[in-house]
Amino acid sequence: EPGSWADACGAVVDNEQLAQVAELTTPGKGKAGGGALGGVDLWLLVFSRSFAEVGEKLLKSSLTQIRVMVQDKLDQVLTAIIGPAESESGAGPGLGARGCQSEDLIWAAEMVGDSLDRQLQELAVDARSLVQSGDSAAADALTISLYLKAVEMLAYLANHLRQTANDLAAAVSRKPEAARGVHLVDAVLLVARLARYLRVGDEHTALRSLLQVPAVLEASTPDRISIEQLQAAFEIADNDGDGQMDAEEAKEAIGAVLAGRHLAIDPELMPTMTFNEFALFSTCLLEVQEPFAYLSGTLDQIFDQAHEVWAQWVLRQPKAVLGEELRGLATSSMGAEDAGWRVEHGVWAEKVIEMEDEGGLASAMAGGSNGHYHERLWLPASVSGALSRFLFEAAAELNRVLSTTDSLSAIDLA
């Protein structure tokens, strides 16, 4: 009837969604008939001992959806840049043979990064609304849960970015001369720009806020380990010394330093991990928790690797041409008369260099005196055509992928 408890619940709660939550904690109850939420009393659910578990599941589910959303957005942008996977010649729609400009990559990276931060901000606001005003114990519990689940989600996301960058780098190295090579490189640079954007973002972003260690976790407890112990465990588990280990090795590493403790790592989401990713995922086990530092380490690694891939790719052709032309110059000088060869190959200037007399040459050479002698050399007075072409090609690529803002510090320019 009007004004019933069911009507009051229905006015403030999505009954269908809450029934699904009830089904998670009390199977069968969410589908029962009659009454508010199909027989599940709202107060009984909210104030039951299962509520904290329900809250954690809701946070984990929401953060998983945010991670998937970000990965999907990134994949959509990468597909637009590279084109269909089966295509060997075409690029994404609207992209020319020279690929993206820096403004395109910056916009795409910021679009993906802003989507992540906006979703995290909305989740933080929604989570706080679950706690009644003045209930400090519930607020602390919720803050800790949100913090730990956010750290876990960001560990998976950072790992995904690194794996994506690795896959793209491998594709570039397999076919650097392919027509779509420039677009693969642009995709690598996009991942690098996204990593940099997340790394140097404003301190007041939702990402940075969620990674602030709750006060209650700052005190050391006997069931935590130092970062040095974690690193030693990682190095022991890293059998081949490549700086990575798989999920099973990570579990063994934790078990070796903390008996009875384990990490619930999903091997499909994180098949391998670096030490920074391992430390980020193991944040809850550390005496001193610095999740943003370990996230930053992973993002910096992505950034550095991506630009190494770009540098090697962009210089491969100019280097080859420069080397070939220099070898041609050397070959043409063999057996040629010096003056005639210099006239044909650029502008040269004669220089006189004063050398120290270390072997008694001053007395044997004209112009030698006081322990010194003079040596006459011909040095190039202008840049060769080969070197000019090399420098201009490198400069053109730098102009394409760099923005004026790249030379500025991460400061507020407003």
Image (tube, rainbow, N blue to C red):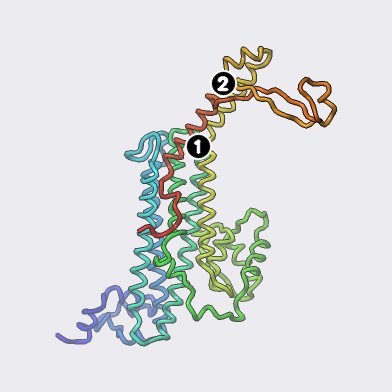
Q: Residue at x 42, y 60 (%)?
A: 201
x and y, in percent, of residue 291 in the image: 51, 67
Q: Work out which residue is located at the far right of the displayed protein and give it.
A: 360
x and y, in percent, of residue 357 in the image: 80, 30
x and y, in percent, of residue 388 in the image: 51, 28
Amino acid at the residue labelled 1: Val
> 301 or 379: nearer the eye?
379
Quadrant housing the C terminus:
bottom left
Quadrant housing the N terminus:
bottom left
**What kind of element bears circle 1?**
helix
> 93 or 331: nearer the eye?
331
Give the mark, 2 or 1, whose residue is nearer the N terminus.
1
Please rate how many residues cluster around mark 2, counting C-alpha atoms within 10 Å: few if below 14, some from 14 to 19, many from 20: some
Q: Residue at x 48, y 32 (%)?
A: 393
Q: Residue at x 65, y 66 (%)?
A: 233
The residue tagged 2 is 347
Identify the mark at residue 314; answer none if there is no mark: 1
Work out whether 322 lies above or below 260. Answer: above
Please rate how many residues cluster around mark 1, counting C-alpha atoms within 10 Å: few if below 14, some from 14 to 19, many from 20: some
Identify the mark at residue 38; answer none if there is no mark: none
**What kind of element bears circle 2?**
loop
Work out whether 200 lies above or below 225. Answer: above
x and y, in percent, of residue 211 in the image: 46, 69
Work out whether 193 lies above or below 334. Answer: below
- Hey, which quadrant is residue 13 in on the image? bottom left
Amino acid at the residue labelled 2: Val
Q: Work out which residue is located at the far left of the displayed protein and give it.
A: 2
Instruction: Judge depth for marks 2 and 1 and give the one in front.
Output: 2
